[in-house]
Structure formats: C-alpha cells, structure tokens
Amino acid sequence: MRAEKAHLALFFTDGMSLAEWDRLGMLERETALYLEMKKHISGITFVTYGAADMSYSPRLPGIGILCNRWGLPREMYKKLIPFLHAKALRAADVYKSNQMKGADAALYSARFHGKKFIARCGYLWSDFISMGAEKSSIHKVRRMERRVFEQADRIVLTTPMAKREIEDGYGVDPGKIHVIPNYVRTDVFLPMPEVRGETGICFAGRLAPQKNPLALVDALEGLGMGLLVIGQGDLQGEMARRAHKKKVNIRFRGSIRHPELCQYLNSASVFVLPSHYEGHPKTLIEAMSCGLPVIGADSPGIREVIRHGDTGWLCGTDAASIREAIQHLMADSGLRERLGKNARRFAVENLSLEQILNKELAVVEGLLKGD
C-alpha cells in the first residue's frame, strides 16, 4: 500500500484537546502538518480527549475528529477509546501517537484493532517529569516507554540525542527509529527588520521550572533591557515579584494565537531560551526562522539545534552566564546580524513544513510496504 491510500489516526497527548490547543494559541501550529498531509493520503482522524472538539470540524476540513463527547472521566475514556470509536478506528491503517504521554492508549488501540503503530514523541516523558517527580512515578513512566518502544512498528523522534537515548536506555532496534525534527512555517515566520528591537529581550514558553525563566529575570538586573514574556504558567507571579524587586521592565503577553507570534518575535532584539531540558523546542526554531539572534542554554534539546557562534549562542543555565551572553550579543550588532541570518538559513534549509511532511509520508509508506 502506498501512502496516498493510507488512513492515519493521530492519538493526542493524554488529556489534550483541540480546545486546549486553541486556548494556548497552538492550534494552527499543531495542525498545519496534518492539514497538508491530508492532501497526500486517503484520510486523517484525530483522537482527542475534549468533550466538544467536534466544533472544530469547520477549521479542519477533511480531518475526522473522535472526541470524548460522552464527558467520561479521562481515565475511563482512555481505556474505552478502542471500543467507543471502534468503527472509525477500524477504517484507519496506521495509528500514531503525538507524544509519549498517551502513547500507551494508541498502542493498545492499535493492537486491539490489528493496526500498525508509530510511536512519535517530541521528548521523552520520563526526562520531562524528572524535575520534581517522585522516583516511583519516573520508574512507572519508563516502564511504559519501554513497552511502547519495544512494541511499536516504527518510532519517530525529533533529535539524534533522543535516538541515542532510547537505543542505549531501552535497547531498541535502531532500524525502526526515524529522526524527524519539528517543523516551522518558514513562509509565515519571516524576518521583519522594520520592527526589530522594539521590545528588547523575548522569552516564549511555559512559565515552569523546566524553562528556567526566573534565571532570565535575574540575568537582566541592572541591564536596562525590557523583557517580553509570551506564555503562561505557575511561575508568572514569582517572575513579576522578582522583576519588580530587581527593577526589570517585564511585560506578560500570555498565550497568543500562533499567527500573531511572528510579530512579537520580530519585535525583539534577542530571543532567549534558558531551559534546563528541551525536546526540539518549537519557539526556538520559530525565532530562528524570523532571523532573530538566539541565545539558548547549553542543555539537552537546545544544543542539538544551536551551533554556537554560527546559528546562535549557547550559555549556562545560571543567571550570570545568561547575563554574560546577553551583554556579549547586545554589544555587537554585527554578530547579532550574522547569527540571525545564519539562523534563518538553517531553518529554511532543514526545518520547513514541506521537508518534514515528506519525511513523515515516507515513514508511513515504508511501514505499509514493509520496508
């Protein structure tokens, strides 16, 4: 069977819905690949956890939506997915997970209906929860990851680092692993030099310990630079208090619709992502596609994207190192311009939607042909 005759069922992250994607401003970003993919295969179906996600059908023409329209408790719905949606799921040829959290439901459904299964994850869930989670919880997640990876027909990961990690940690056959990075709409996230530098420093992401935003606030003390924060999370209050104490001009924009993000990114002089850990960070590659000079922590997932001194600048996760990197770039306009141009070129040459779409289609076709 060729890819154009295939029907793909995408299983959402456990608990995630189209409505939540929309609320977080992620709907356009997350669905762009599948709106393009549906032009090349016979069908696409989303399996979500929302109660009213069918209302998004007009915005997702040609994509089927299976959701928790019964309003069942999440865990109950998760276990009943292969039964509640049996007719529609039997029509699909390949099931695919969107992230590792929830991949067990996709695997179970695939085996129940005798379908092929692609385990896709942008990051390892066990790494994601390692900061602050109890050891018993981490062990439970790792057992689930092992089961999913061992039984998956194909595995799609976003970085070579993640590939090495599951090869070494789980003994997975390298032959069934494909590295496909996240994509960026390079035709949408374009350089806008006419607004560059209006807002100083920009950060975009969840306001959570993993993203390390408090260290960025500390790093800006006394520099006289504004900080634009896009996103939301539990640390917003502490960031505001710390910024007030350290006299850092901080502006919170919350979650914004994805098409509007380009304007905000372009208005900054430098984009900074000081995270302790990332998978393949989408806001970072979107900033790079805008031709923005980027600073990233020398952390897993970021160091795989930024080539230090070429497509961006790497620093430590502590405030002093972040501060030094910001000062270095802000003192050298020529360096900022060179890094921004190289970052844009990297995004266009490696991460465009068309390139990633072709790789995704190749995995589906190879799986169905038995390659």
Image: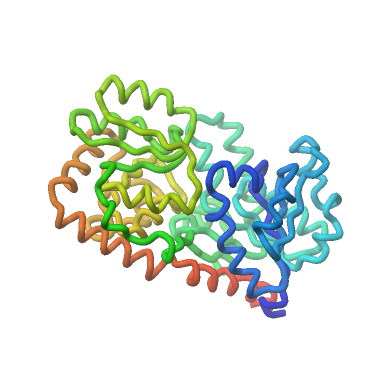
Q: Residue at x 39, y 40 (%)?
A: 276
Q: Residue at x 28, y 52 (%)?
A: 195
Q: Residue at x 48, y 35 (%)?
A: 232
Does residue 197 appear to the left or right of 61 in the view shown? left
Residue at the extreme front of the image, as rendered: 194
Q: Quadrant of the N terminus?
A: bottom right
Q: Nearer the viewer, residue 264 or 102?
A: 264
Does residue 6 appear to the left or right of 325 in the view shown? right
Q: Is residue 368 above or below residue 188?
A: below
Q: Nearer the viewer, residue 57 or 214?
A: 57
Does residue 71 appear to the left or right of 4 in the view shown? right
Q: Is residue 243 visible?
A: yes
Q: How far across and how far down the image is residue 317, in percent?
A: 31, 38
Q: How far across and how far down the image is residue 206, in percent?
A: 46, 38
- In the figure, residue 220 lies in which quadrant? top left
Q: How far across and how far down the image is residue 158, in percent?
A: 49, 58
Q: How far across and how far down the image is residue 346, in percent?
A: 34, 65
Q: Residue at x 42, y 40 (%)?
A: 230
